[in-house]
Amino acid sequence: MHSHVRKMKGTFKIIIFLFSILTVNITSAQQTEIKGRITDSKSGEAMVGVHISLKDAVHGTISGSDGTFMLRTGIQPPWEYVFRYVGYVPMDIVVTNTSVPLDIRMEEQFLLGQEVVVSASRIEENILRSAVSIEKMNLRDLKLISTANFYDGLYQLKGVDMNVHGLTFSLPNTRDSMITQITG
């Protein structure tokens, strides 16, 4: 009878040992949840689609329609988060406490480029100098076309062929020496 009790004690010790190992593995694999809200620093409006990721890791998410986000990770603290959005200054934030939701306010980023000059002309100058015939169609001409749609009306222009690929699918094709200009 004593041997039977010893076997039960030994089995009980093994079960306790396995349970403690399992508990340690479960607690070490727990996910930490980080929540927050991202807004524009000037207007205070929620920012949708901001990319949030852990630095040097594959964990990430984007902010929702109300600017809020939630990210779960098994990585141990401290966490360094990277916030990126086109037209805003990228932010790197170190987080050590997950009990308080993050309040992120992103600032606009202005990039100065080189000067751009825009000029306008009723008829492109290179078209006027070209040695080919020019066919023009404006908005008034489009309204006067007696076809079901715009593409069927292109067929009436000189030098435009329509490749018909089905009952409702046609593609316009111009000859190499023809320049067709549609103005609005």
Image (cartoon, rainbow, N blue to C red):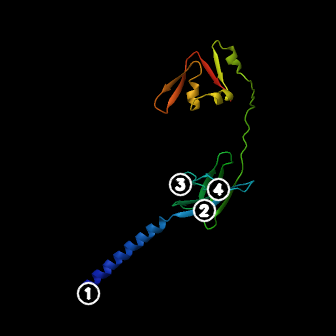
Mark 2 crowd level (few <14, some 14–19, many ≥20, 10 Å Cα): some
Q: Position of residue 170 (x, y in %)?
A: 51, 29
> Distance from label 2 to label 1 (Cα)?
57 Å
Name the residue tied to disc 1: 2
Label for residue 35? 2
Q: Which quarter shows the C terminus?
A: top right
> Distance from label 2 to label 3 (Cα)?
14 Å
User: Which sits earlier in the primary sequence, circle 1 or circle 4?
Assistant: 1
> Distance from label 1 to label 4 (Cα)?
63 Å
Going by the numbered disc 1, the residue's amino acid type is: His
User: Which one is nearer the viewer's eye here, 14 or 104?
Assistant: 104
Name the residue tied to disc 4: 93
Name the residue tied to disc 3: 59
Kind of element beneath mark 4: strand
Going by the numbered disc 2, the residue's amino acid type is: Lys
Residue 105 lies in quadrant: bottom right
Mark 3 crowd level (few <14, some 14–19, many ≥20, 10 Å Cα): some
Going by the numbered disc 4, the residue's amino acid type is: Ile
